[in-house]
Amino acid sequence: MAKMVVLLVLFTLFLSFSTNEVGCKRIYREDHMGLKRQLKLSNKLAKKTIRTKYGDTYDCINLYEQHFFNYRSLKNHTYDFPVRSTSNPKGIRDQKSSPLFNPSNFWLNGKGCPDGMVPIKRNTEDDLKRAKLATDIHNSKYKPLTIDRPGTHYAIVRTKNTNIVYHGGSTIISIYNPKVEGTQYSSARIKVLNGPDSIEVGWTTSNSSCFNTLCNSIIPTSTDIPLGIPIVPISTPEQQFDMKFMLFWDSANGNWFLKFGQNETDIGFWPKNVFTALGDGANYVEWGGEVFSPPGVPSPPMGSAYSARLQEDTKYDAYCRQIKTINETDYVVDAVDTEEFSDIVQYQVHDEGLTGAADFQHLVLFGGLGGYTGNEDF
Ligand SMILES: *[C@@H]1O[C@H](CO)[C@@H](O)[C@H](O)[C@H]1NC(C)=O
Ligand SMILES: *[C@@H]1O[C@H](CO)[C@@H](O)[C@H](O)[C@H]1NC(C)=O
Ligand SMILES: *[C@@H]1O[C@H](CO)[C@@H](O)[C@H](O)[C@H]1NC(C)=O
Ligand SMILES: *[C@@H]1O[C@H](CO)[C@@H](O)[C@H](O)[C@H]1NC(C)=O
C-alpha cells in the first residue's frame, strides 16, 4: 500500500485559519463529523463505484454535485465555475517528466470515471484518523497571521521581489519516500503565496496528512486523476523519477488551477472566493522541501536523505528542476531573482541557477538527514 507518497494539496495548512476559518478544522467539524453521514452522501450521489489496484474505493460523482458545492459560501455560484482554465499558460517549454501516473495502471477498470464525473475517495476510518490528526496538529501549532510554524523546517529557493504579480509557477520534482513517524511529515512542493493565503502542491510522506477533499477547498475536475494518489516508483541513484506540478492563476476569473504531469492536465481548482489575497494572484513563489516534527522528536529526513551534505548531483540529491514562474501576461518563464533559504543546518538547499542543461534549466537541490530536536516554543 503506497500510502506514504501522495500527490499533496496542502492548501489548508497555511491558509489563514484566523480570518475566515477555511481549513481542516472547520471542514472537519462541519462536513466530516460522521463517516456515516459522509458515506451516506457519497452513496446517494454516487453514480458508479470504481476501485484502484491499491484497494481503494472511489465514487464517481457528477462534477457539479460533489459536496464542495454545498458549502454555504458557494451555493449560489455552482454553475459559475469554469472547470478548466479559460486560457493556458504561454511560452515554449520542455514537457518531459516521468510518465508516472497512468490511469490505465491505476484503476481496475483502466480509465476512471465516465465523462462529467469525478472520482471522490470513499474515506476509510484510517483516512479520517489521518485527517483528524492533521487537524489537531495544524491547529495547535499554527500561529494566526504568521507563517512561522514551530516544528516546521524548510530548505527552499524563493522569489525575492514581492512587488511582482505572479500568475503561478511550475516545476518538475523528483520523487522520494523519506521515513516519517507519528505526526511528522516530509514533503517536496511548489508553493504560491499572497498575504495569509497559500497553495502548495507536490508530494508528502505523512501519517497525518489531510491532502484530499476532507481538508481542501480544491474542486477536483478530472475524470481519471484523483487527489492524493500514490506516486511510485521512488527515485534511486541509478534512476530518478519526477513529476510536473503547475499552479496557474486564471486572471479571467481569479481561480487557481492545478495542472499535473507532462501534459499539464487540469486536475482541479480553487475558486477565487475561498481566498482573501491569493484570489488576485500571487506575489511570492517557492520551491523545495518542508518537514514537520512535534516537540522533542528528532526531525525527519528531507528529500533523498542520501547524506548529511548535499552531493550537488541530481542522482543523489532531491531536486526541483525547471523552476518557473508565470508572468503577468501568462508566459511561463524561468524563475529569476531567487534566493536560498533554510532555517537549520540539518536541511540544505542549493540554487544552481540556470544550468544550461535543457532538462534541468533553473535547478534547485535540497534535502538533509534531519535529526534536529530544537527547544521549540509551542
Ligand atoms: C443565495 O441567493 C439567494 C437568492 O438570491 C439569497 O437569498 C441568498 O442569501 C444567497 N445565499 C448566499 C449564501 O449568498
Ligand atoms: C501510520 O498509519 C498507519 C495506518 O493508520 C498505522 O498502521 C501505522 O502504525 C502508523 N505509523 C506510525 C509511525 O504512526
Ligand atoms: C500527453 O499527450 C500526448 C500527445 O497527445 C499523448 O500521446 C500522451 O499519452 C500524453 N501523456 C499523458 C501522460 O497523458
Ligand atoms: C512575459 O514573458 C514574455 C516572454 O518572455 C514577455 O514577452 C512578456 O513581455 C512578459 N510579460 C511581462 C508582463 O513581463
Image (cartoon, rainbow, N blue to C red):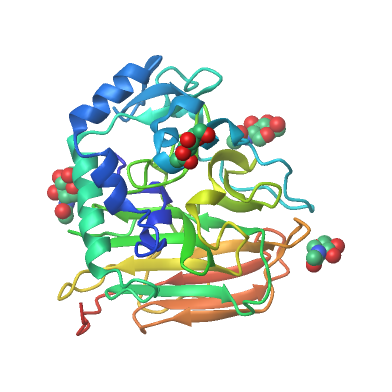
Of the 4 image quadrants, the one containing the C terminus is bottom left
Report the residue that reaches farthest toward the top. 47
The residue closer to the viewer here, 353 or 158, is: 158
Q: Quarter containing ligand 4?
A: bottom right
| Residue 135 in the image, given as x and y percentages of width and height | 25, 55
Q: Residue at x 34, y 47 (%)?
A: 215
Of the 4 image quadrants, the one containing the N terminus is top left
| Residue 101 in the image, given as x and y percentages of width and height | 50, 37
| Residue 126 in the image, given as x and y percentages of width and height | 19, 40
Residue 249 visible in rendering: yes
Q: Residue at x 67, y 69 (%)?
A: 335
The answer to whether residue 110 is left or right of residue 369 is: right
Residue 123 placement: quadrant: top left
The answer to whether residue 102 is left or right of residue 345 is: right
Residue 229 visible in rendering: no
On screen, 296 above or below 42? below
On screen, 17 above or below 247? below
